[in-house]
Every structure is written in structure tokens, then in C-alpha cells.
Amino acid sequence: MDYLKYVNIKQGSQSLHRFSQGNTLPLVQKPFGFAAFCLQTETSRGSWYYHPGDRSVEGIRLTRQPSPWISEHSAFTMMPQIETPYVKFEDCWSGYDPEKAILEPHYLKCYLKRSFCDFELTPTEYGACVRLSFKKDFDRFISVLPVKRHCEYEFDKDNNRLYCWTDCNRGGKSHDKGTLKGYYVFQFDDDSVDVDNILVGNRDTCHTEHSLGISGEGTGIHIALKKKDVTFTVATSFISYEQALRNLQHDSVYSSFDELKEENARIWNEYLSKIEIDADEDTMKTFYSCMYRTFLYPHKAYEPDENGEPIHYSPSADKVLKGVRYTDNGFWDTYRTNYPFYAIVAKDILPEIIEGYIQDYKDGGWLPRWTAGDAQNCMPSTAIDAVIADVATRNLISKELLETAFEGMEHHANKSSTVPAYGREGCEDYLTLGYVPYDKYRESVNLTLDAAYFDDCIATVAGILGYDDKKEKYLARSKNYANLFDKETGFMRARDSEGNFRPDFDPVKWGLDYTEAAAWQTTFAVQHDIEGLADLYGGKEGLIKKLDEFFATPADYRVGGYNYEIHEMTEMAACDWGQCAISNQPSFHIPFIYTYLGEPQKAEYWLKRICAEGFSWRDDGFPGDEDNGSTAAWYIFSCLGIYPITPGKPIYTSNKPLVDNIRILGKTVDFTKHGNVITYDEIMKQIEE
């Protein structure tokens, strides 16, 4: 069955800075690919450089942007031009018909009216194969243009190759030093390039000149083409030109563009068919568009050396080291759904991904928190603890690697980092007071609750490794969430260093003490100890009553500590789900608490509504930021009827599925017979037997 026909890779891309309906990009790439490609329609919007309603194209971008809030690294743009070529996107853009363009996981095709050119692309492991077809006989160019920062180009006329690099990246130590670079090699056929008419230029002037190379801020090169029909390949590297050339040779295993395209279609169908369902047409399209999204990130970031062994550029060490690496992932978002999902459907590749994250600790002394090429100072705490505990409880990591991971987990759980992109903010105060005080740190409630949860994850790993004393130590710390519970209001509230609650409390006031949320969404962030949370409300019935109130409370908000409205507020208020903001990750698990407490019918009511009202396969198909596959995986779990209520523990809640005849990895499954909670082993037993 061809599942590609159900996929809309534009799902969620109809987004704006102030209102996200996914904040996604229509990426053409291999699953978990090293490089991704996307139409660039208008860069005046910054990170929102693609919109499905635009009728212009500025180029086809090699992109590694994991989120518009994180932005770009190691990017460039390709653009066919005729007659007089330009470097500035404002000068070189072309009209196109978006309704006629073909955008699929494995293939991109668009007709650029200004240059009378069909542009086609299908990905390779480390780059892409591109086919151009000019319809009229003007002077023809394929331009390689800068996204930002410094670029360098040199055409090797003896081998018909273009070499270029850029230090385009968003942040971190490598941004400041310009050490994280993208290296590219373009290979053209012998008779396709008019070497005498290659042009170079920069953004600051319209002037171009004949040259085989140029270097500088905002520079570009225009490769003159002899023929109307040209096919070329490009390979990328984080290491060097030599490595990019090696990657090019590694990718050269196909005989034609069409053969590669067909192979890419086969690979994507293999991934999409890992879960088969029966449903109506709209649900099928939404489901498989979400399946596509779950396999985009993280991006592979290692390359083969001369012996085929994995090596990688380490931004933290600023050197090339042995081993695998993965990047472009925000764990505060993805720990909740992605990794428990991969443990079921992608357990063949998940151990390597985890090994890549632990490699960051080996390289630089800290486990990653948010990676986009380099470490990014974005989102709180150390959610990778839950990712590591999750694979450990599913026996998907070696004991030796787990020992190294545990070392890194203990390091950031007990020592603050001087580099904001690493570790737990407020770590020492948390150890002393049992909470993070608001008079010293913003978002102190989230910092405390996350630390308690992730301490539970560390305890889990300690138990697996046989460190019983440490297990008890971290289990005791995992109860610290209770230190912020205010019995009078029934919410988690910030305390100062003296133990006083912050005055003037309002449960709909966002920010300040809470991360992208208010007290309503944050109070339930005790996934690791739902029984203990229920005890704070006097028992199971008390917590269920609080959940009822959560869904019954209007979606009101106050800007609070943000001093302005952030898009998550706008998105929550646009729906009719009470204070449940599925537009953002803190609310993901909350409906499933009903199931865990023995009232699955209430969860099923809200899941059916949220999935029907908030999700679709269309360009506006998400209720908020999609975030590296996390929201797509939430939808998939909701359809299947299972949900990882506590990442880091091998359990899932079980509800009636929203789809029929579920087959995972070819096996028909029925999770409803296990009651309200099903273990990972019970899930895999149905799949593997």
C-alpha cells in the first residue's frame, strides 16, 4: 500500500509568529536525515520563511531548522536564474503556483515562472540529487546563495565541482567563534557547466563579476549552465571539504534521479507502514501526515571516515571525534511522546540516537538539553533524564552506556553549570531548600517540578544499575514537588527563599513562575507520582474533581510575567477545552490522568473532541507548535488508545482507540484487554509474538 498518498508535508505550516498551527516546515529528507530541503518563499519573515499561501519562491533551502524559535544552522539556498542573476532574495524571487507544486517526503518539484524552469529534488543520505529543466533558451544559472553570515565558494573547473562553506548558525559557543560550519560539494557533469561565465556577487550590490570564487559576508555564486536539462548532486558535511567529497561518494549508489526517487519513496513507505490503521479518509490523512512528522527529527549528525567508521564534529569540544551524534531536538518537548513512541516502532534506530546524545556528554561534560547543531539555551531543566530512563526500562541501552549516562545525569542533578545551555538552573538551591526559590530564579515552579520528576528518572536508572543507596536518595528528592503545593488554593505555587508563597496569586496568570503556562497547566506536572499528587487533594476523588474543574474553567489568561501575550495563550483561548492547552506540551498528559485513576470515559470524551477539533491533515492541522514530532506523536498515541503517562517508566494508559484494525509492525494488536494501564512488555508481546 502506498501510504505517501495520505501525507501532507505542509501540515501545520500555515502559521504566523503570533499564531501557530504547527510552526512546521514541509521538509523533503530521509527519515532522521542528515540534511533536509524546503521551499523558501519569503525570508522577510525571518524563521517563518515558508508559508503555503505564498506565491513566490526565493530558492530551495538546505535547512536544519528544528523550530522557528531556534532558527537555522549550516544552511544555504539554491535558485535557478536566467539572464542577470542576483544574490539578494528580494531581487531574485520568482512566482510559482503552490497548488501545482509537488511536495512529498521524498520529492520536491516546482515550476519557477521567472526562469521558466522546473526544479526537482530528491534526497540522498548526506545531501540531494537535483534535476533542472529550463523551458526557454536564455543564459542559465544555478545560484548558490547565503542564508546569513560568512560564506566561501570556489569552483574546481578540472573536476566540475563547486566547493562552499558557511558558518550560518543560530547560537551557542560555536556561533560566537564561527566554528560550526557547513561544508558542501556540488558535482556537475563534465559538459554541463560554462566555466567561462560563472559569476559571483554579494547582497550589498547588484554588481556581479566573472570569477571562480568569492568569500565574505552575504556572498553568492552563479554557476552558468550550458544545457537546458541538467542534473547535479550535492553532499554536505560538518567536518571538511574532504569529508563532504567522501559523503558524496558514499551517496553515489544510484544510476538516475528517478531510481533514487523511487528508492526514497520505498524507504518512506517502510516507515509510514510501521503502523497500519483503518479509518475514514480525513483521519487516514491526518494520521499518516503525523507519522511523517515523527520521523523527521532528530537529525543525524555523524559521517563515515575513510574506513566507514562513524565520526562527528563536536561543537562543545571543537574537534572531530569518533562516534555517532544526533542533533536538532528539544527534550522538554520530545521526552513526553517521541521516545516512548520510537521504543515501539523504531527500536532498531533508537539505541543509536541515544548513544549520540550520550556522546555529547563524553565530548563536552554535559548531557544535552536542547541541541541545534550546538547546545541552545532554551527550555528548562534536564528532560533527557526521562529519555534515558525510558530506554533503560525498555532494555534498549547497554549497561556500559547506561553507566556513562548515569554519570552525566548525576553531574547535572547536583552541580550547576556556568554555561546557561547546560544543566539545571537553581540546582544548588533546590538541593538545599527542596525547591527553587522565585526570588532568585524565574520559572521556579517548573524548575522545581521538573527536577523532582527527573530525580525520579535518575532513581530508576540507579535501581537498574544496582545502586540502591542512590536510588533511595533520588526517590526521596523526587517528592520535592509537594513543597510547592498550596492546600488553600489547590495549586503548585512559587516560594521565596524564606518559604513564603508569592503573593497576589492568580491561576490564569502565565509566565514568571511557570514555563509557557500558568498554574492550571503546571500543577499536574507530577507524572512520576500521580498517587502522591492525588494524596495532596485528599485522594483519587479529589484529584478527579480538580481535573473536572480544569476542563470546566474557561480558557482565560493573563499575560503575567511575560508582560505581553505569547502565542500559546492565543492558541489555548482559540479552542474550547477549558484550561487544557494541548497547543503546548505541559497539557499533553493531563487527559490521560483520568484513565490512570480509573475513569477512562472522561479521557475518551476529551481525546475524541481534541483530536477532531484540533487536528487535521491540512496546512493548519495542529492546535499549536508541533515541536520536532512531539505533538504528532501525541495524536498518534491518542488514535491508538495508548499513551506514555510517565516517560521513564515502562507503562502506558489504555483507552478505546479512535481508529480501527490497528496493526503495528505487521501484527494486529488490541491493547484494551489489559485494563487502564498496559506495560511496555505487554505491548511488545503482542507485536513480536
Image (cartoon, rainbow, N blue to C red):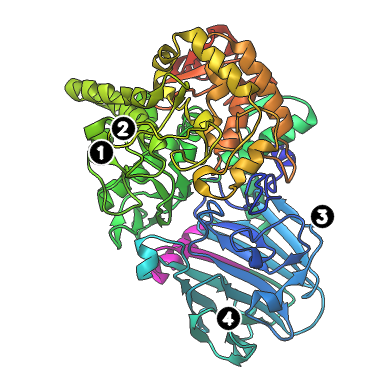
Image coordinates for residue 168, horizontal then vertical, percent: 48, 68
Name which quarter of the figure residue 460 lies in: top left
| Camera-side mark, 4 or 1 | 1
Q: Is residue 377 left or right of residue 8?
A: left
317 in relation to 594, above or below = below
* Count of numbered marks: 4
* Residue corresponding to mark 3: 99
Residue at numbered disc 4: 221
- Of labels 2 and 4, earlier in sequence is 4
Q: Earlier in the sequence, mark 4 or mark 1?
A: 4
Residue range corresponding to the magenta coloring: 232-252
How much space separates mark 2 and mark 4, taking CA atoms? 55 Å
Q: Secondary structure at mark 2?
A: loop
- Upstream in the sequence, badge 2 or badge 3? 3
Real-space CA distance between mark 1 and mark 3, rounded to the nearest whole angstrom: 56 Å
Instruction: Give the spatial CA distance, label 4 vs label 3.
Output: 30 Å
Crowding near pointer 3: few (<14 within 10 Å), some, many (20+)? few
Determine contact: label 1, label 2, CB under 8 Å: yes
Query: Hey, what amino acid is under mark 4?
Result: Ile
Amino acid at circle 1: Asp
Q: Which residue is mark 1?
A: 429
The quadrant of the rendering that contains the N terminus is top right
Magenta segment includes 246 = yes
* Of the two numbered discs 2 and 3 in the rendering, the one whose residue sits closer to the viewer: 2
For the residue pair 47 and 425, the one nearer the viewer reads as 425
- Helix, strand or loop for disc 1: helix
The residue pinned by badge 2 equals 435
- In whole angstroms, how far apart are the C-alphas of marks 1 and 2? 7 Å
